[in-house]
């Protein structure tokens, strides 16, 4: 007797459980509190929160690359730098600086397209090292543009005449909006067909390609989105500090921050970078006055997380509780077996 088997057309997909009501209410309350923060908190507090939002943005973008697409990059600082200098260039051309952040992010997406043609020729460790080299190349190109300040960098003078309190509040709201947009974009992207394709590519790229997944297209879309996100973070850093210096903005420490945050919070989960960014931000503020011990503690925490929490803090919480703020998976809800329909039609006839 032949066993009936499912066909591709007869398998029905459904998304996993929707976010819980409690999670939705907590998230909404947190958004409201953060939105009114400039009215109830000192400027020092909101300025620090801008830094937290920047960390969240860059970590979410790295998680999108490495955690979902399997593209382990240590060169995303290239787009942080290009985003900062793109924002600077548009501001010098007369564009309002906060609007220039979006244009700088668009420049990063445009630059990432030809960059991906080269980077995607590399695999594994070669891809990681290659992206680092590409970031250094872009840094060397930037410092050779006299109008952008050269090796010593330059200042953004367009915002200096604005009242510091007002400037800080607007910068905070722009950073908050970009952080929400980043998390929301990741959620929507991963809940669609791209999310399924990325999961297949991450698990086995060759098998995914043999099953009809357009591997290059899926990876390129994620690479462009991650570049734009990193570019917006670079623009925020410029607007916050009102100055930029190439060695700092193109520093590999940004990639180190991304990796630490994602590994600590949980790779391959949207919630991971959020949890990791909050913890890393707290460690920075608690330990920054201790000099070298600050780096020692960060190193010890990262090693401990890699050994005892390979799935990250949020991964452990999700596995034990089953709770998720951002469910992005799919599950099979119904299968019609080949042959069953014919037998039913025969009986009906």
Image (cartoon, rainbow, N blue to C red):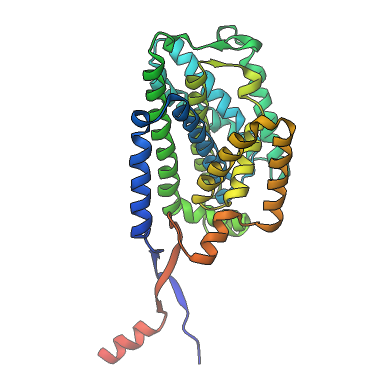
| Residue 42 higher or lower than 269, as above or below | above
User: Would residue 329 be visible to someone looking at this image?
Assistant: yes
Tell me which residue sits at (44%, 73%) in the image: 7
User: Would residue 349 be visible to someone looking at this image?
Assistant: no
| Residue 86 higher or lower than 48, as above or below | above
250 left or right of 347?
Answer: right
Residue nearer the viewer, 185 or 41: 41
Residue nearer the viewer, 209 or 247: 247
Residue nearer the viewer, 184 or 144: 184
Residue 346 percent coordinates (x, y): 31, 89
Rendered image quadrant of residue 162: top left
Residue 156 percent coordinates (x, y): 49, 12
Rendered image quadrant of residue 281: top right
Residue 286 percent coordinates (x, y): 61, 36
Tally the marks: 0
Q: Which residue extends farthest left?
A: 349
Residue 310 percent coordinates (x, y): 65, 56
Tell me which residue sits at (44%, 39%) in the image: 182
Split into 4 quadrants, where in the image is the C terminus? bottom left
37 left or right of 246?
Answer: left
């Amino acid at each position: 007797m032949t066993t009936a088997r499912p066909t591709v057309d007869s398998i029905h997909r459904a998304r996993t459980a929707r976010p819980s009501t409690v999670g939705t209410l907590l998230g909404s309350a947190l958004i409201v509190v953060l939105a009114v923060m400039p009215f109830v908190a000192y400027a020092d507090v909101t300025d620090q929160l801008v830094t937290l939002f920047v960390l969240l943005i860059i970590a979410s973008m790295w998680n999108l690359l490495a955690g979902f697409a399997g593209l382990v990059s240590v060169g995303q600082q290239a787009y942080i730098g290009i985003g900062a200098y793109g924002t600077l260039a548009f501001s010098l051309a007369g564009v309002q600086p906060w609007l220039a952040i979006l244009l700088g992010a668009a420049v990063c997406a445009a630059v990432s397209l030809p960059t991906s043609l080269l980077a995607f020729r590399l695999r594994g460790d070669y891809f990681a090292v290659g992206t680092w080299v590409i970031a250094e190349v872009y840094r060397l190109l930037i410092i050779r543009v006299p109008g952008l300040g050269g090796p010593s960098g330059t200042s953004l003078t367009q915002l200096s005449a604005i009242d510091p309190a007002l400037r800080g509040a607007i910068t905070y709201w722009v950073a908050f909006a970009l952080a929400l947009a980043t998390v929301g974009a990741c959620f929507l992207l991963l809940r669609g067909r791209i999310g399924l394709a990325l999961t297949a590519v991450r698990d086995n790229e060759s098998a995914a390609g043999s099953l009809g997944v357009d591997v290059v297209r899926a990876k390129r879309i994620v690479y462009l989105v991650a570049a734009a996100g990193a570019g917006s973070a670079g623009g925020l850093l410029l607007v916050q500090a009102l100055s930029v210096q190439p060695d700092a903005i193109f520093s590999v420490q940004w990639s180190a921050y991304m990796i630490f945050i994602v590994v600590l919070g949980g790779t391959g989960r949207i919630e991971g970078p959020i949890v990791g960014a909050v913890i890393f931000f707290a460690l920075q503020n608690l330990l920054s006055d201790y000099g070298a011990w600050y780096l020692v503690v960060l190193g010890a925490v990262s090693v401990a997380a890699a050994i005892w929490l390979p799935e990250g803090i949020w991964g452990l919480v999700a596995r034990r509780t089953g709770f998720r703020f951002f469910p992005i998976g799919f599950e099979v809800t119904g299968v019609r077996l080949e042959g069953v329909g014919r037998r039913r039609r025969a009986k009906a006839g």
